[in-house]
Image (cartoon, rainbow, N blue to C red):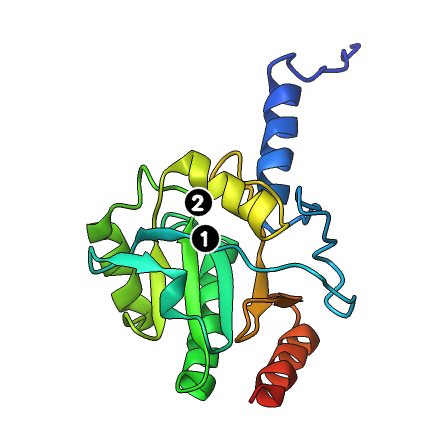
């Protein structure tokens, strides 16, 4: 008896390719943003000012970067329904808040503002103990957020929620971007801690 070779359906391959693209984005495959900064290299000399912006935080109040000026702060991108890299990213931030919360501020920007309502941000913030005044979780219109990521912070543009950087973007008290640190790499997180300790 002869057995024929089963060929994959013409529908299956595109689905697999689509899944690979989506997964690679959500696992933090980094790209250089419009700002021209290679965020994969935390040690490079960076001559870029952090952007000034506004949004709505987890309490429903307005957030503005004027609230963090004058002290070092960390910016990240996430979305609440992410089940892959975001929980790990925010676990790292939770640990950093516990260790440096009196010195550093944290601003996490949602890449899915349509889903991430104030109520949803509040629930998510409570899960990580993120309190306004130390760790803000912020939403804003999608087009504003995308421009902020790419042109403002020089990281990959979140054209869909999962296509966001997993780097911790360090900003000094003078609003200069000081470095990009890989939240999934222990050595990189330790470098970030060293930077925090070096700040006045």
Q: Is residue 16 visible?
A: yes
The crowd level at tag 2 (other Cα within 10 Å; few <14, some 14-19, many 20+) is many
In this image, 100 relative to 171: left or right?
Answer: left
What residue is shown at x 59% (from left), y 89% (from top)? Answer: 197
The crowd level at tag 1 (other Cα within 10 Å; few <14, some 14-19, many 20+) is many
Task: Provide residue 48's location: percent of width, then percent of height.
Answer: 66, 59
Task: Kindly identify which residue carries mark 2.
Answer: 111
**Contact (Cβ within 8 Å) of mark 1 with mark 2:** yes
Measure how far apart labels 1 and 2 are at the Cα level. 6 Å
- Dot 1 or dot 2: first in sequence order is 1
Q: Considering the numbered disc 2 on the image, is that residue within a helix, a strand or a loop?
A: loop
Q: From this view, report whether residue 127 is shown above or below residue 14.
A: below
Task: Provide residue 79's location: percent of width, then percent of height.
Answer: 41, 49
Mark number, residue 68: none
- Quarter of the figure with the N terminus: top right
What residue is shown at x 62% (from left), y 88% (from top)? Answer: 198
Task: Kindly identify which residue carries mark 1.
Answer: 78
Q: From this view, report whether residue 129 is shown above or below residue 17.
A: below
In this image, 138 relative to 48: left or right?
Answer: left
What residue is shown at x 59% (from left), y 24% (from top)? Answer: 15
| Nearer to me, 124 or 137 | 137
What residue is shown at x 52% (from left), y 40% (from top)? Answer: 147
Q: From this view, report whether residue 4 is shown above or below residue 51.
A: above
| Nearer to me, 160 or 56 | 56
- Quarter of the figure with the C terminus: bottom right
Q: Is residue 162 visible?
A: no
Task: Provide residue 96's location: percent of width, then percent of height.
Answer: 48, 79
Q: Considering the numbered disc 1 on the image, is that residue within a helix, a strand or a loop?
A: strand
Q: From this view, report whether residue 38 is shown above or below residue 114.
A: below
């Amino acid at each position: 008896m002869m057995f024929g070779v089963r060929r994959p359906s013409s529908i299956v391959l595109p689905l697999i390719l689509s899944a690979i693209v989506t997964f690679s984005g959500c696992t933090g495959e980094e790209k250089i943003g419009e700002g021209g900064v290679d965020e994969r290299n935390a040690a490079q000399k960076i001559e870029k000012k952090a952007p000034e912006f506004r949004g709505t935080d987890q309490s429903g109040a307005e957030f503005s970067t004027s609230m963090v000026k004058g002290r070092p702060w960390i910016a990240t991108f996430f979305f609440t329904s992410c089940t892959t890299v975001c929980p790990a990213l925010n676990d790292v931030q939770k640990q950093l808040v516990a260790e440096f919360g009196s010195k550093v501020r944290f601003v996490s920007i949602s890449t899915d503002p349509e889903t991430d309502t104030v109520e949803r941000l509040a629930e998510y913030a409570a899960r990580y103990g993120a309190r306004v005044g130390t760790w803000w979780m912020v939403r804003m219109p999608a087009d504003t957020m995308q421009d902020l990521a790419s042109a403002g912070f020089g990281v990959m543009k979140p054209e869909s929620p999962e296509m966001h950087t997993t780097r911790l973007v360090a900003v000094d008290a003078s609003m200069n971007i000081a470095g990009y640190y890989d939240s999934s790499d222990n050595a990189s997180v330790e470098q970030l801690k060293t930077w925090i300790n070096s700040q006045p």
